[in-house]
Amino acid sequence: MSDSSMFVRVGKWIDYRMPIFTMMNHAVVIYRTPRNLNYWWNFGSLAGLVLVIQLATGIVLAMHYTPHVEMAFDSTEHIMRDVNYGWLLRYVHANGAAAFFAVVYIHIFRGLYYGSYREPRELLWWLGIFILLAMMATAFMGYVLPWGQMSFWAATVITNLFSAIPLVGTDIVEWMWGGFAVGNPTLQRFYSLHYLLPFVIVALVVLHLWALHRFGSNNPIGIETKGDKDTLPFHPYYTVKDLYGVGVFFIAFFAFVFFAPNYMGHPDNYIPADPLVTPSHIVPEWYFLPFYAILRSATFDVWFLSAKLIGVILMFASILILLALPWLDRSPVRSARFRPVYKYMFWILVTDSIILGIVGGKVPSDPVFSGTDGFQYVHLGQIATLYYFVHFVVFVPLLSRFEQTRPVPTSLSEPVLKSGAGGTA
Amino acid sequence: MGMELGLRTAVAATVLCLATGGVQAAGNAEHPLTEHWSFNGIFGHYDRAEAQRGLQVFLEICAQCHGAKYLRYGDLADLGYDEDQIDAIAAQFEVEDGPDDEGEMFMRAARPTDTFPEPYANEKAAAAMNNGKAPPDLSLMVKARHDGANYIYALMTGYDEPPEELELSDGLTYNPYFPSHQIAMPQPLWGEDVEYADGTETSIEQEARDVVTFLAWASEPGMERRKNMGLKVMLFVLIMTGLFYATKRKVWKDVH
Amino acid sequence: MTDNTAHGPDGEARRDFLYLTTAAVATVGTVAAVWPLIHQMNPARDVLALASTEVDLSAIEIGQSIKVMWRGKPVFVRHRTAEEIAEAKAVPLDDLRDPQPDGERVQKAQWLIMVGVCTHLGCIPLGDAGEYGGWFCPCHASHYDTSGRIRKGPAPENLLIPEYVFLDDTTVKIG
């Protein structure tokens, strides 16, 4: 004890009274992790990294931004032109939002493929969906802040949706606006909430990691680990692998930030907001396009439900349906690796989601194929929306009952040691 | 194995869809041609000679109607002007200052710290003097339009006789590169609008090229610094990732 | 830390070298990434650009002072009387906490230009006040003389002289 360094002695003093170092050791050093994880498991840590990047850049940007309709656009240009490294902080933050969704969508699809939402990880999955919802609210409000044309009109279109709620719709919308249209009260409260929500996300992430550590990570073959022969300590194996993933991520991320910083954005947002001029096409950022497509796919009233209301319901349902997944999927097999039909359906779902994304960015009445005027993007969107729900509500439950699954290995380490390939899908 | 096949399918589907869709020019505007610009590409830079000539075109022609409120005269140092030249350029323009001790606003010569003055007192005055449409500020125009540089160049050089069938609305001019083909701005460049300080021969194409380079700089003066830093960052990150990969392989060697 | 089995002394050294290099590169990267987050708080380009102010001296009578804003702070511009100048020059340097001859503090003797911020804790001193014919700071009773030098009270230094240049006899550019 007497020849431990000062650091070690102070560390032990603190840890005895508040076991933070012991906790950190258990959480990221000795924490046992399945030995057969592939690179699709890197996206969780990447999401955490992007969250930290967004928080850091967001907090310093807030030192220079002014949340008032007369000054928001100007203060954003002030950041771009005058603030030291302001252009870099802004571009990192804007492209970081896109990166956050890219990383999280892959992370979610990983979960869908390998059955990571299955018992006993239902709550982990639910927390993840709550994080996604919080991210979407945060991103939506953040996009309004520069007060460009898209900022203003996206805010107008999306908040207007809530007027579809029967009886109280208009009151709710005026309450959200703080007025009779999107205006300064709206901008200021969006700024406040945009600053707040990321910390709610942090809290949800803490809960998400806590739930994760209860049973540990799922793995590509979907069977539970049995003891130390199936696992590795998180450090150094996965710290080092996650670091490598971070490096690859940075290559892609910085390529955008430095050489194509406005590629993901819309030029109209470099035009100051004008409540009297509507842009020819109001489009959200790419990560909202699939939901936008679902929203616009409801084109006719049904009974007492207006088309607008149906669209809103479908849009939220498309995310909320994921909450039901652990109970819709009762297959005896967890991982798609041993579910040949589900695997196929998974890739169709991915394609369907991409199609929805493309539809979201198009003019609904435009024809899909230049020859045939009858088949428009809105129709393609309706088919894709229907398919999306059919996948979860029909195919998944049916497959869980009737699918002929392939034999699942009994041990984790066996196939890894035999094949020698280990980390790849 | 299944992942790969599935992935290929998804990618193929996306590419197919994107290929059939294509990027539409706004409305039914004609697609501008892709010009070669000094500021494109990872080594992009603003050609100083072009930008200086472009400033001249902007100040002598465009600034009659268009503002550039995010530019300061002092910023022009970036384009290679020295302090005296900037003072001289600024002094040609007047800005409002005040109130003085009597409470009155007054006009004075612009200084390097002043932003380019607005040509009209307010938006309504601007619209009233220009066929009902206020000429937009040009500080960000290259970023505010899809394929901005090519679009503005095409617009400047694209004024032409309207086709027989087209009925021009009152006060509008024909330009195929503008959405709806009818633009409120009458042709601004005719080919001999300025006498270049550096003696370059003028033409619509030359003036358009120069003013686009100037406007590109105006939209993003820091572009060169960004790309420069980007090259260093990319190099660093590539090396760093290589090291991370080697470390990962070493650590995992005994496990595989 | 790691329990990699040794592959002989040479292999081990090579492995450690890799880890060391990787850690060093990662550290450099992190520091480089953190720098913009810190530097963004330094004065921005527009603040630095507003670094100078021009003052018209023609309206200032002898014995009169005006106050102008420069870089967010007040600057006293005083048209000194002959008595004030003489008084300032007559003070022996040994009497001064912050010794500075009057000649060093002015370019033209009749124009005293100084930053009107007390060098103690930043309050604005009052003109034509105090026991030395100059300025008096009401916060903690610092007295400045007709050259703006500290004579009595807690302030450690004379009132600061900003950078300035006479553009002509009636115009001075501060900063």
Image (cartoon, grey):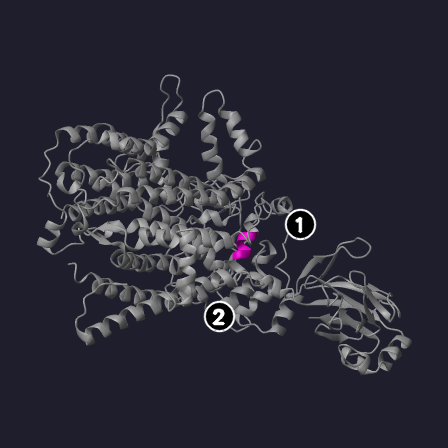
Residue that lies at the very extreme toward the top in this rendered image: A303
Q: Is residue B92 above or below residue A395?
A: below
Q: Quadrant of residue A291?
A: top left
The Cα atoms of the two marked residues, 2 and 1, are separated by: 32 Å
Pick the front one: A317 or C34: C34
The residue at the point 30 percent across, 50 percent down is A43
Give x and y (percent) for residue A227: 18, 48
Numbered mark located on residue A343 in the image: none
Q: Are marks 2 and 1 in contact (CB under 8 Å)?
A: no
Q: Is residue B155 left or right of residue A103?
A: right
The residue at the point 11 percent across, 56 percent down is A420
Q: Is residue B97 magenta?
A: no
Give x and y (percent) for residue B2: 14, 45
Q: Which residues are magenta?
A: A75-79
Q: Secondary structure at mark 2?
A: helix
Looking at the image, tell me whether mark 2 or mark 1 is earlier in sequence order: 2
Pick the front one: A306 or B38: A306
Q: Quadrant of residue A68?
A: top right
* Residue B198 appears in view: yes
Numbered mark located on residue B48 in the image: 2
Task: Identify the image quadrant of the C terminus of chain B.
Answer: bottom left
Pick the front one: A329 or B94: A329
* Amino acid identity at mark 2: Arg
> Which chain contains the residue that carries disc 2?
B
Helix, strand or loop for the magenta stretch, by majority: helix
Give x and y (percent) for residue B159: 46, 53
Q: Is residue A23 left or right of residue C107?
A: left
The residue at the point 55 percent across, 56 percent down is A78
Give x and y (percent) for residue A309: 40, 25
Numbered mark located on residue B121 in the image: 1
Q: Is residue C20 above or below residue A110?
A: below
